[in-house]
Image: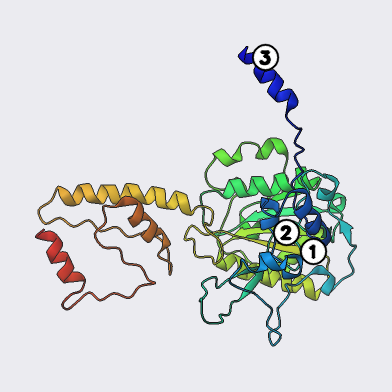
Amino acid sequence: MDDERASEDSSSSPMVETAEIKRTDTMELLKKLKVTVGKDAASIHDHPKIKTLISEDDVAMYSKTIGSNPNAHFKEPSKLSDWCEVDVLRSPLAEDKKSASFISPNETILVDVISHTKHTTVSREFLRAGPRELIATDPRHVKAAIVTCGGLCPGLNTVVREVFMALKNLYGVEQIYGIPYGYKGFYEPDLEIRLLTEDFVSDIHHEGGSVLGSSRGGHHTKMICDAIVDFEFNQVYIIGGDGTHRGAIKIYEELKSRKLKTSIIGIPKTIDNDIALIDRSFGFDTAVEEAQRAIDSAKTEALSAFNGIGLVKLMGRHSGHIAMFSTLASRDVDVCLIPEVKFVLEGSNVMHSHRQLLLHR
């Protein structure tokens, strides 16, 4: 009887159509989305809330109106079309109607997100990253190069693999090369530039270090640019830290002065997590996890000695993110010193007096 009743209920219930949820960069399709998926769908909230597309009743729900500053000039990033002729092509992602997902060239991310309820506040903004509907190079004619520079970092091979997979499987790029041992791999005659394959990169994310090899220095702008021209690379993906990116800017400027149709893409590499507007830089979580072992060992040593003190120095240069997050995760640290917060060692109510209180606790 229960089965029959359930069958009758299901047959009499109305059919509910589920709308396809997808993100687009056009205002017209935004309007259609509001009709097909509803104003509360995730695909709507993943877009900027353009005031002219929102009803007056909905506008009243928001406490802030964000407008452009007419006296400020938004600096657009450089594009190939600034110095050479390019073809304007639709992205291959547009062929996949179910997963096409593009970011408008006018969408931005606010930097200064803390506001005030009673005062007008200001903020800087950066262009939002993501795939664009229009591209400047036919993927069939792309010859890409990937290079890792500077010190090693957890996750390097994962980044190399994902760049390859995105180029190969999403855009259909066939020629993707790995540059050995950093910048010098472009021009050093004893080092071989190799064509990357799916078999080569399939399991590299399980390995440490860099399968391409990495090195510090070796930057020679003219020789690198000459090699880029000789090998006919038109997309170069450079994975490295601040020094590496200073070199990447010089390469970009040299190629621009030659009016070459070559894109230079910088991928920041730092375990210090000292990059604005991102939650985590790759390698940071691993660094914090490994720091726990050092803290645990220091605690064991300190507790095993009379008036023992465990002192752990962590990486970070001018950034205290690793030390701070390691302290929060450990819960065994009494004092955490980071460069962002000033501290005094001598005198009353400072570090040394606090240390004495801990020792006699």
Q: Residue at x 84, y 50 (%)?
A: 94
C-beta proximity under 8 Å, tags 1 and 2: yes
C-beta proximity under 8 Å, tags 3 and 2: no
Say which residue label 2 marks: 236
Q: Circle 1 sits in a helix, a strand or a loop, which is it?
A: loop
Q: Residue at x 76, y 70 (%)?
A: 52
Q: Quadrant of the N terminus?
A: top right
153 or 106, nearer to the observer: 106
Q: Does residue 131 sit above or below 350 in this rendering? A: above
> Can you tell which mark lies on residue 4?
3
Q: Residue 196 at what x, y percent from top left?
A: 72, 43
19 or 92, nearer to the observer: 19
Q: Quadrant of the C terminus?
A: bottom left
Say which residue label 1 marks: 262
Q: Residue at x 69, y 24 (%)?
A: 9
Q: Give the mark, 3 or 1, whose residue is nearer the N terminus.
A: 3
In the drawing, does residue 161 fall left or right of residue 358? right
Q: Amino acid at mark 2?
A: Val
Determine the CA span between mark 3 and mark 2: 65 Å
Q: Amino acid at mark 3?
A: Glu
Q: Residue 115 at what x, y percent from top left?
A: 52, 74
Q: Give the mark, 1 or 2, whose residue is nearer the N terminus.
A: 2
Q: Does residue 151 sit above or below 126 in this rendering? A: above
